[in-house]
Image (cartoon, rainbow, N blue to C red):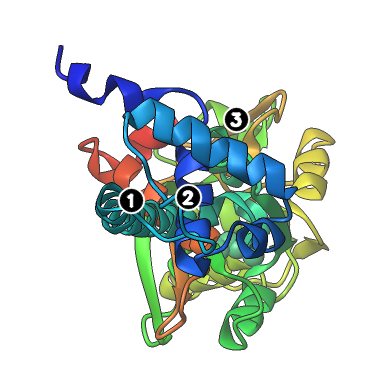
Amino acid sequence: MKHDKLRRYLRRGTLTQLAVFEAVARHASFTRAAQELHMAQPTVSIQVKKLAELLGVTLFDTQSKRACMTPAGRELYAAVQDVLLKVGELDDRLARLRAPECGRLRIGVSTTAEHLAPKLLARFCDCHRGIAVSLAMLNREQLLQRLAVQQDDLYILSNPPADAPIVMQTLAPNALFFYARADHPLARQRNVDLAAVAAEPLLMREAGSGMRLATERLFRTHNLCLTHYMELGSNEAIKHALAMGLGVALVSQDAMAGGKDLVALDVVGLPLRRWWCLAHPEGASLSPPARAFWDLCKVGASAEAEPAAMLQ
Ligand code: PGA
């Protein structure tokens, strides 16, 4: 067997005995070694005696008053230096690997991605149980303000501004549809014209939200006026208002989870196809937890043909 030769070194306590021996040899004194190791001197002597018996050699000159090493002791001392150095280096490397297991991961999440973020976190927390996670749910404008001052480690949002100084990776598709209650007259029609949607009472998120921006841009592109709308401060409120038959609304498919009796309208040119992105400010140095989350999302995205596959 490969370790046969090493058997005598692999007993329980050998590493402790080697460390005790090293201290005695370095100080040339049992007393000083005992002080350094916070052990009683007889315990130190016993550990060294057991080690000598185990190795079948004499380690210290018994004639001398000081703890003077024998030739075998000197051989062992040189080897123990190497062993302890290697163990120390190993511990440094493991400490770096352990580092992501503590600390806090702070992610700013766009309100519309509130269903997506926990799906990503479920995988992350499975592998990194020691990390505390905080999610700040905010609309797009608030999120971009926090991003500018690096208030969080990472950000999940859709289509960040092209000129923003950020680094990002795509996470999953984000499809925007017009929704209405299933009994809405437009729900039964195919190839609905956007002008017909614009003629309906519209439900809109607050100014500063990504959904508001997307709706305004869409209407502007088609030279349609946005005059008749009701403003609601959350996707949840929009879902409830849709369910009450109060109108139609442009909403991300991701935000519609659990929306009962609501249907996506078949509007020409829709859905608007976007991407959910994970971003951080350019030049930001990521904390170990943030780096671990970033890498996990990257692996999830590249492991499959579609980035969205990690969310299935
Ligand atoms: P919102 O943002 O949650 O403010 O609507 C969605 C987005 O990031 O575009």
| N-term mark: 3 or 2 | 2
Q: Say whether marks 2 and 1 touch (CB < 8 Å).
A: yes
C-alpha distance separating marks 3 and 2: 77 Å
Dot 3 falls on a residue whose secondary structure is: strand
Task: Find residue 260 and report its horizontal and vertical position in percent.
Answer: 72, 24
Residue in view at x 54 percent, y 58 percent: 289
Label placed on residue 73? 1
From the image, state whether disc 3 or disc 2 is nearer to you. Answer: 2
Residue at the far left: name it: 2
C-alpha distance separating marks 2 and 1: 9 Å
Label placed on residue 21? 2
Mark 3 = which residue? 263
- Going by the image, does 40 lie left or right of 168? right
Vertical position of residue 166 compared to residue 102: above or below: below
Task: Find residue 21 and report its horizontal and vertical position in percent.
Answer: 48, 50
Residue in view at x 60 percent, y 36 percent: 46
Dot 2 falls on a residue whose secondary structure is: helix
| N-term mark: 1 or 3 | 1
Q: Nearer the viewer, residue 251 or 35?
A: 35
Task: Find residue 248 and report its horizontal and vertical position in percent.
Answer: 67, 47
Label placed on residue 188? none
